[in-house]
Amino acid sequence: METDPYFKREQTATKHFILRRYLQTLVYKLFLGGHREISYIDGFSGPWETQTEDFSDSSFMIAIDVLKTAHYDLKAQGKPRTTRCFFVEKDRRAYELLTEAVSKHHSPQDSFYVATFNGRFEDATSEIVKFIGNSFALVFIDPTGWTGYSYDAIRPVLRHAPNEVLINFMYDFVNRAAAMSDPKTIESLDPILGGPGWKGRLKGDVPLGQEIERI
C-alpha cells in the first residue's frame, strides 16, 4: 500500500527490521547482564528519503525508540541505567532536521543523553571517544555507498572496548566496483579494503565476492 512508509523501499524495511531486533535484544542483554551505561553511535544518521513526519521510518528514530523503551522500562523496575546517543550527519539541512527531531529526547535528569555532530563521521572520532567514556558502545555504520568510514580514521572508535559494531556493507555495489579498472573507483575502495594495492592481494582462484569479504 502506498500509505506504507516502506512502499517500494523493501531494502530499507529489511535493514530497519534487523536494526530494531538487534538493538532490542542487545540492549536488554547488556543492561540486565551488568552494564550500567551504554552509548549508541550512528555515523551516518540522515534523515534520507523518510516518508513520515516524525521520522519513525529512520534509523536514528528507531534507535531512540528502542533505547528509550529499555531505559525507562528498567528505571520503572528500580534499575536505573545511563543511555547515551550520538548522531552524526554531514549534510547541513539533514542535520537541522535530525537535531530538531532528537533533541526533544535529551533528558539528563533521567540519565538519557542525546548529542549530535554536524560533519563527517571520520572527523567526529575524538568527540565520540570522549562521549563514550567507559560505557559499552554500540556503533552503527550505514553510509550511502562505501565511503566516509576509513578504518584508519575511525580506528579509535572501533578499538574502544567493550563494543559491538554493525556495518551495512554494500556488498553488491562494492563487488561490482571492485571488478572495475577505473583508477578513481579502485582508489575509493582503499580505505575499506586494506589500503592501496588491495587488488594485488586478491587470490585469483577464489570468487571475487569472497575475496572482498576476506580482505
Image: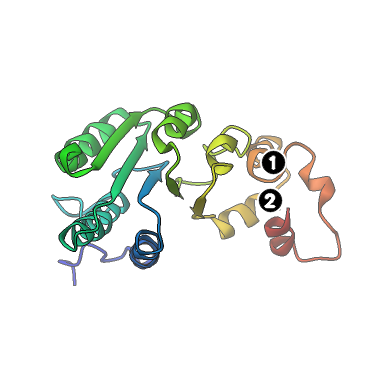
Q: Mark 2 highlights which residue?
A: 178
- Asked if the residue under mark 2 is in contact with the one under mark 1, i.e. CB atoms within 8 Å, the reply is yes
* Mark 1 nearby-residue class (10 Å; few <14, some 14–19, many ≥20): some
Visible in this render: residue 42?
yes
At horizontal 58% and vertical 58% (from top left) the residue drawn is: 171
At horizontal 59% and vertical 37% (from top left) the residue drawn is: 155
Q: Is residue 80 left or right of residue 76?
A: right
Spot occupied by residue 98 in the image (x, y as percentages of width and height): 24, 38
Pick the front one: 150 or 171: 150
Q: Quadrant of residue 102?
A: top left
Q: Is residue 203 left or right of residue 163?
A: right
Q: Quadrant of residue 99?
A: top left
Q: Amino acid at mark 1?
A: Ile
Q: Which of pointers 1 and 2 lies earlier in the amino acid sequence?
A: 2
* Mark 2 nearby-residue class (10 Å; few <14, some 14–19, many ≥20): many
At horizontal 36% and vertical 68% (from top left) the residue drawn is: 21
Visible in this render: residue 48?
no
Q: Mark 1 highlights which residue?
A: 186
**Label 2: which secondary element:** helix
**Mark sitting on residue 123:** none
**Label 1: which secondary element:** helix
